[in-house]
Image: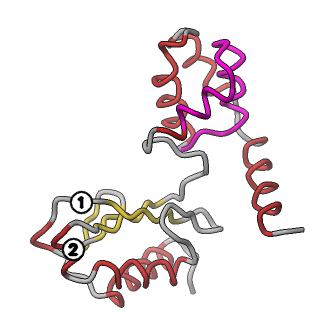
Amino acid sequence: MTPESQETNKRKEADDSVDLSLIKSLLDSEGDTRGSLISLLQGTQSIYSYLPANALRLIAERTGISLSTIYSVATFYSQFRLEPAGKYTVRVCHGTACHVQNANAVTIALCDTLGVTDGGTTEDRLFTLEVVACLGCCSLAPVIMIGDMTYGNLTPNEAVRVIKSIRRREGALK
């Protein structure tokens, strides 16, 4: 079995375990028209932290919008995720100030430590890594944000220490 087919199987298993009853009230309250698609997708993602395939199929059934149209909308807007996100989203700023202060090295260290690339989620679903244009913390460059916590003036090693600290706190690192 190829790594791609293994990943597809994992995604299908995760989607099959999604409780669709959680979005039934959303579908009832948002209506079932074409004009409600964005709000349905936003509400669905708010519930599951991503857009599960079986939830998209249910939206298609209820609204009469083709599944391909729904996927076109979901993949067009960067706010939507088709993959489960981690418990913690690690945002690495690559704005001008951070770039000049070596954000690339911080990103490489985080990619190596987490075993993912930009947009990826760790196998244990603890972390999702996102490279962002700017976090608005230029005086702290380079900076990462995890949840609502900002970590600034980082070296690659310090960024890795932050991740290890969270892993330890979560019991995922001895």
Which image quadrant for residue 8? bottom right
Please indicate whether residue 54 sits to the left or right of residue 79 in the image: right
Q: CA distance from mark 1 to mark 2?
A: 8 Å
The dot on residue 134 is 1
Residue drawn at x 45%, y 39% is 77
Residue drawn at x 43%, y 60% is 89
Q: List x then y, in percent, for residue 92.
A: 34, 68
The dot on residue 98 is 2
Quick check: 99 above or below 34? below
* Residue closest to the far left: 139
Quick check: 13 above or below 47? below
| Quadrant showing the C terminus | bottom right
| Nearest to the observer: residue 147 or residue 98 | 98
Which image quadrant for residue 160? bottom left
* Residue closest to the far bottom: 157
The reply to whether dot 1 and dot 2 touch (C-beta < 8 Å) is yes
